[in-house]
Amino acid sequence: MAERSQTAPEAGNDIGNEDVIGGNVSKYVVLPNGYSGQPKKGHLTFDACFESGNLGRVEQVCEFEYDLFIRPDTCNPRFRVWFNFTVENVKESQRVIFNIVNFSKTKSLYRDGMAPMVKSTSRPKWQRLPPKNVYYYRCPDHRKNYVMSFAFCFDREDDIYQFAYCYPYTYTRFQHYLDSLQKRNMDYFFREQLGQSVQQRQLDLLTITSPENLREGTEKKVIFITGRVHPGETPSSFVCQGIIDFLVSQHPIARVLREHLVFKIAPMLNPDGVYLGNYRCSLMGFDLNRHWLDPSPWAHPTLHGVKQLIIKMYNDPKTSLEFYIDIHAHSTMMNGFMYGNIFEDEERFQRQSIFPKLLCQNAEDFSYTSTSFNRDAVKAGTGRRFLGGLLDHTSYCYTLEVSFYSYIIGGTTAAVPYTEEAYMKLGRNVARTFLDYYRLNSLVERMTVPMPRLRFGLQRTHP
């Protein structure tokens, strides 16, 4: 790497340079030192002023090397992980080194082969950079903090290139997805607005079940699922979409699940943070997953709305709230895995392990050995911990984690990088596991016997 001026400002402590990063770069053209004319091809233009974008500052180190500073979460300088920005005005065959210099976390899957995502206007499908071009190391020029550097060669002058920490999944994409589901007019799919965020974005609540289960006085078994309380954990949205896609499908397993269970899903608990390109916090700088004990209706309105609904269902004698699953992504571990609670009642503790064990049998990327049960004080304000203490012994509360990077299949050592489709497949397998948990398999066999043509068609699209 090129030598930097010893008088340059540094980054990486709790505040560091972040006290002067007030927002995202907007069509920022990097000109060589001493250059005063119009920008030429090869004078890179950086931009992050778009939905879920994040890049706070750019400094050119030399002709081909650039230091990039993540913009901290709004109102909270502690969190600097998510990045998502574009580069244009490139020259064909122009080679660069980009250094992300102010991560707030030291442990990272970049140590294990993870690489940033890239796409361009002529190649709109996201792909990972080759791991051999990515370096993660302590940098003496940035107070010995960890820096992630990657080498890249621009190959098409007219393309706009986009780089991101992981596959983006924006609030707008989510709204378009729900709109498309609504237009299908399925009598077992219901969408309602449970509330609004501080910036007046929708808190959507989905109910997926047979209409008969929603009749007045009908006893209900409810599975409650939430996602994206941490906005930078984009894999949780892909997993959640996989769950939803499977449950609304005509697959025989999905039809049996709809007949016997009520699925309540709030897929995006932090829509403001998602829109703003934050990693962990809401607009006002709160980690919402530490405020379940007493969420404020004005500071944490989405959390407040979900909690009130859960308490209402808990107090309904006709409703059995059987599962609560909060979906997250993990920045240092491989595979999918779960966190559960610890109970004094040994039998309840053992029953709690059944669902993750079954999921491990259904999903090759899910690891039961990485699944753990705890009651750490630092986790007391999380949905899993709070609801685990509120609900009775018939309810089970989990955090479902999935790696930002990859999974390792049992019996092998090779890491398989996650794709958008692989994340959604994990979601489908989560949904299927409820069939095993409730021992409804015989009903699926009965349902498929008189419909051989439908079954054949479904086999071809088997998740």
Image: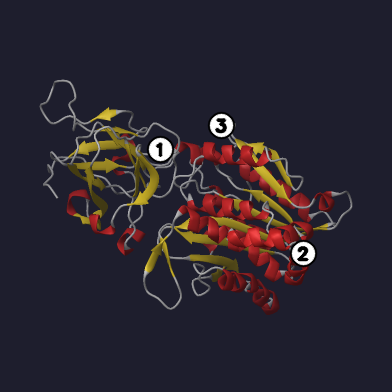
Residue highlighted by disc 1: 53
Q: CA distance from mark 3 to mark 2?
A: 46 Å
Earlier-in-chain disc, 1 versus 3: 1
Describe the element under mark 1 as helix, strand or loop: loop
Mark 3 burial class by Cα count in 10 Å: few <14, some 14-19, many 20+: few
Image depth: mark 1 or mark 3 in front: 1
Earlier-in-chain disc, 2 versus 1: 1
User: Depth check: 245 or 330 in front?
Assistant: 245
Tell me which residue sits at (59%, 63%) in the image: 429
In the image, is 398 to the left or to the right of 66?
right
Report the amino acid beneath label 3.
Answer: Gln
Describe the element under mark 2 as helix, strand or loop: helix
Residue highlighted by disc 3: 199
Q: Residue furthest top?
A: 37
**Residue 342: image x %, image y %?**
61, 71
Tell me which residue sits at (40%, 59%) in the image: 405
**Residue 122: image x %, image y %?**
34, 38
Describe the element under mark 3 as helix, strand or loop: loop
Residue highlighted by disc 2: 447
Report the amino acid beneath label 1.
Answer: Gly
Report the amino acid beneath label 2.
Answer: Met
Q: Residue furthest right?
A: 217
Q: Residue furthest front?
A: 453
User: Depth check: 358 or 188 in front?
Assistant: 188
**Residue 457: image x %, image y %?**
64, 58
